[in-house]
Image: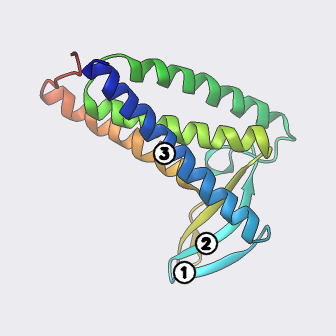
């Protein structure tokens, strides 16, 4: 196995770890709490058990059910694209970002395919205002996307070495 193949395996392993952590947390919440459950952890953070049939910020949550298949198809298509991107030699920061997004996309796609909707359980709030509940998959997607944005700004200023080996 050459160095590039080894690195690819590392990036795919990271995506699988995000997927596994996401599914483990969702399964734990689903098995140990009832829907609608909430537990205050700090003055600004709750653990909750809510379902989201929509996308980010509950986009299309009340669309009647067709959105499940629509968002699942998008997640599968994006996952194939991300796999293709990870397989190509590129800067490590980009591969890291694509891996995090892939793990998150697969985590939420699994929920849509198996449960019909996504389990969310992390609730940040301040002064009566609640950020929409989210999960580990959402964190992977958000951190990965933010990393891509930051990498693009850094890349515009200086060239990055790729994993060509």
Where residue 59 appears, x then y in whole percent? Answer: 68, 45
Assign a secondary structure to mark 3: helix
> Which residue is tagged 2?
47
Q: CA distance from mark 1 to mark 3?
A: 25 Å
Where residue 45 appears, x then y in whole percent? Answer: 53, 75
> Which residue is tagged 1?
41
Instruction: Please give left or right for residue 28 compared with residue 142 in the image.
Output: right
Q: Quadrant of residue 116?
A: top right
Instruction: Please give left or right for residue 51 compared with residue 45 in the image.
Output: right
> Which residue is tagged 3?
17
Where residue 14 appears, x then y in whole percent? Answer: 42, 40
Q: Are marks 1 and 2 in contact (CB under 8 Å)?
A: yes
Q: Quadrant of residue 107?
A: top right
Residue 126, visible in the rendered structure: yes
Where residue 110 appears, x then y in whole percent? Answer: 68, 40
Instruction: Please give left or right for residue 57 compared with residue 149 in the image.
Output: right
N-terminal of the two: label 3 or label 2?
3
Q: How is the image coloured?
A: rainbow
Q: Which mark is residue 54?
A: none
Assign a secondary structure to mark 1: strand
Q: Is residue 76 above or below residue 22?
A: above
Residue 98, visible in the rendered structure: no
């Amino acid at each position: 196995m050459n160095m590039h193949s080894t690195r690819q395996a590392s990036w795919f392993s990271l995506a699988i770890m995000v997927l596994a952590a996401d599914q483990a947390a969702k399964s734990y919440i689903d098995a140990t709490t009832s829907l609608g459950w909430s537990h205050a952890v700090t003055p600004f953070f709750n653990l909750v058990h809510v379902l989201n049939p929509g996308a980010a910020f509950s986009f299309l949550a009340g669309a009647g059910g067709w959105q499940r298949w629509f968002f699942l198809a998008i997640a599968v298509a994006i996952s194939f694209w991300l796999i293709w991107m990870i397989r190509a030699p590129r800067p490590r920061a980009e591969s890291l970002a694509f891996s995090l997004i892939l793990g998150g996309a697969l985590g939420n796609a699994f929920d849509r395919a198996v449960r019909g909707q996504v389990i969310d359980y992390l609730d940040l709030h301040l002064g009566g205002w609640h950020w929409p509940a989210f999960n580990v998959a959402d964190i992977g997607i958000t951190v990965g996307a933010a990393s891509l944005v930051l990498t693009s700004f850094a890349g515009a200023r200086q060239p990055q070495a790729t994993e060509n080996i």
